[in-house]
Image: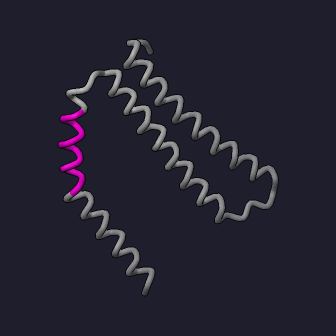
Amino acid sequence: MKQKRFYIEVAVRQVMILIFILPILFSATFDSMRQMEQSNQSAILTVIGLLMAAGIIGVFEATYQKTQLTFPLQRTLAHLTKLLLFVGISELSHRRRWRYVYGVG
């Protein structure tokens, strides 16, 4: 019963965020982004990309800690996956910034 209540609370919270906070956030963010220079926009997009990478890796790490990986090869592959996720997302945000700042890419 407690688990069902927890899921209901999470669902209600997410719906409230989508209905009330998200439209306000979009209007405030888009107006500010339009008024900025492109170099500042690309810097912000880079930071957002790195924050997304950190979030993905955090979820991966939490999942990794709950699994039973007994073999060294499994552990090595899990760490390699985490590293490749971070490098891939960082590289995408770096290329996006390079394209906006220098017009290359």
Residue 83 location (% of width, % of height): 64, 40
31 within the magenta span: yes
Above or below 9: residue 77: above
Spot the residue most to the bottom.
1
Is the N terminus in the top left, top right, bottom left or bottom right quadrant? bottom left
Residue occupying image coordinates x 20% and y 27%: 35
67 displayed left or right of 28: right
Furthest residue to the right? 72
Residue at image point 41% right, 39% down: 48
Q: Quadrant of residue 38?
A: top left
- The residue that appears at 62% across and 38% down in the rendered structure is 84
Q: Name the side, left or right, on which 4 lies relative to 92.
A: left
**Quarter holding residue 11:** bottom left
Task: Please determine whether, in this image, residue 14 is positioned above or below residue 72.
Answer: below
How many tags in the picture?
A: 0
In-front residue for pair 29/84: 29
From the top left corner, tell me how far across and down residue 18 is, in percent. Answer: 25, 57
Residue 43 x %, y %: 40, 28
Q: Is residue 40 magenta?
A: no
Above or below — where is 38 with respect to 44? above
Q: Is residue 63 left or right of residue 77?
A: left
Tell me the magenta residue range. 21-32
Q: Position of residue 63 (x, y in %)?
A: 60, 60
